Image: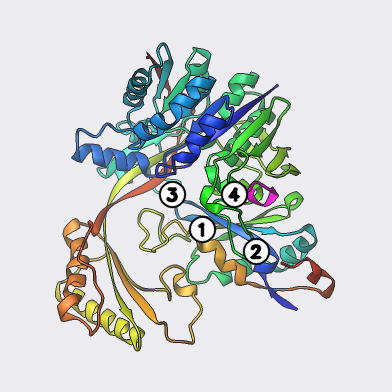
Amino acid sequence: MGIRIGSGSAWWGDRISPAKNNADKGRLDYLCFETMAEATVSAAQVRKRRDPTFPGYDTWLDDRMQAVLPGCLKQGTKIISNQGWINPNGAAERIVYWLQTLGFRGIKVAAVNGSLITERVLDMTDTILETGEPTHSLKGKIVSAEAYLGAEPIVQALNEGAHIVVTGRVADPSIFAAPMMYEFGWGMEDYAHLGLANGIGHLMECGAQVTGGYFADPGFKDVPNPWDLAFPIAEVDENGSAIITKIGGTGGLVNAMTIKEQLLYEVHDPANYITPDVVVDFSTTQLEEVSENRVLVWGITGKPRTPTLKVSIGCEEGFIGEDMFFYAGEGALKRAKLAETILRERFKIVNLKAEELRIDYLGLNAIHGDMTPKIDHEPYEVAVRVAARTLNREEAMKIGREVDGMAVSGVGMTGKRVPHQDRTREIIGVWSSLVDRTQINPTINFYES
Amino acid sequence: MLIKLARLAHCRSGDKGNTSNISVIAYCPELYETIKTQLSAEKFKAFYSGVVNGTVTRYKIDGLHMLNFVCEGALGGGVSRSLCLDNYGKSLSSRILSFEIDVEKHLEQFLR
């Protein structure tokens, strides 16, 4: 017996038409959405604080649901999604609204809560993993804290008849592992199968990154019709293997190379990839290209899960101010360098208090910084990018103010845009810690259309 | 003959906090041992001097002919507070493709 699980998104800003394509033509049993980055919850909390009308779930929820609900409901495809962010109940109610609007009645929607622990985090955690400092040192700066839930509450919601499950923070692979565990009855002590389930979930969680996205390198790795990339589909067999594939006729490709690149994406030790459900061992992974755009994956195993869950703690850490301006033609780089000198002097005059200041030349050193090889020719174009990290917004605004000054009080032939967007942004620093998993108790609310 | 890694392997970088992991995957099994012998964690770190400030640990999956370099202190203090234009370090992996590998004559047939 096998099931077909499709990807509906790999992040908040992902494309929507490939999700609709999977819903309409993927013959899926499950369509799974991953929409959260590390700082998503913190950013949502900040936004909610400023704008109480912000509902607190995926801002693309309406668009995504309108696109996929007709196809999914017509074919009986269930949906698992972490679009709930800081308000899974609100997201579930909104999904019910769309179900009713589209004429689907009696559909059960479950909201998984319990990942948010902002008020309790200092009592539940000890050490910041990145620095070794006590988490108490973050007191007064915490915007949000959330524990990474595993697949169990999703499996429970499916067991209780949910057709659509929407969650807050859940580990990305667990979103995809849950339907395998539910359908095949893989229990929490079935480490080999849980390892496989989360390993396949890991391959799927970044969507098109396994079907030819984030991959093309002309001349070395060419991708057919890269403008028409599909999101992946996993055909999972209950014996413990899966075929990663995509809808026929779409662009992109699935082969051993795309699978290998995604296999270790954001993975450190391949033999010990810790998820809430299991410790995945990728070191014994086997791959076989069985036919065009179909790769058989097996041999991923697992070890018992850890007694702790990861916690992300988002903290207010100040602001970043950023802007840029341009030069071209004969002597462009010399003018850019003079502009940098002027700016550094003016930052002294306005007494800029920056934790860090960075002035880069786009095209020369803005991306790889100090490890960029020296160039032996004059670039025809140079953009000067100025960025500073500061403790308050007033200081961050000085960056844009002094770049404005370069318009009429700067260097000859300076190209500059009228400010068209906010040139300062708040930094939500994300730190990690661990919490005893027995202290986290997810709850499920059910809704019906 | 000294050949850029780009003709032997492909790569991908991923981010977690202030750590970037960069995988290096041989295009064919015949080239893997050569890469593994010459691209140590120390050499990798030296090649990223100025950007990677912490420890570099090398992991491998021999069966899939791939290495994984876990680079601490590589993302300017972390994705959210980094002033780097590419704060996620998505383009960091491309750097290693210009690392030069001494390729024996009989292996040149396997180069891209």
User: Can the viewer see residue A306?
Assistant: no
Which dot marks residue A220?
2
- Same-chain check, marks 4 and 1: no
Along the polypeptide, which appears first: circle 2 or circle 3?
3
- Same-chain check, marks 1 and 2: no
Label 1 or label 2, whichever lies nearer to me, is: 2
* Residue drawn 58% across the image and 48% down it: A251
Along the polypeptide, which appears first: circle 2 or circle 4?
2
- Above or below A272: residue A101: above
Which dot marks residue B72?
1
Q: Secondary structure at mark 2?
A: loop
Q: Which residues are drawn in magenta? A: A253-258
A172 vs A90, nearest the viewer: A90
| Gap between marks 4 and 1 measured at Cα | 32 Å
Q: Quadrant of the C terminus of chain A?
A: top left
* Residue drawn 61% across the image and 20% down it: A183
In the rendered structure, which amino acid carries the disc numbered 3?
A: Gly
Please state the chain letter of the residue tagged with numbered disc 2 in the rendered image.
A
In the rendered structure, which amino acid carries the disc numbered 2?
A: Phe
Q: Secondary structure at mark 4?
A: loop
Along the polypeptide, which appears first: circle 3 or circle 4?
3
- Above or below A398: residue A82: above
Q: Quadrant of the N terminus of chain A?
A: top right
Please state the chain letter of the residue tagged with numbered disc 1 in the rendered image.
B
Q: Which residue is mark 4?
A: A252
Task: Judge from the rendering whether residue A170 lies leftward or rightward of residue B30; answer left or right.
Answer: left
Q: Which residue is mark 3?
A: A132
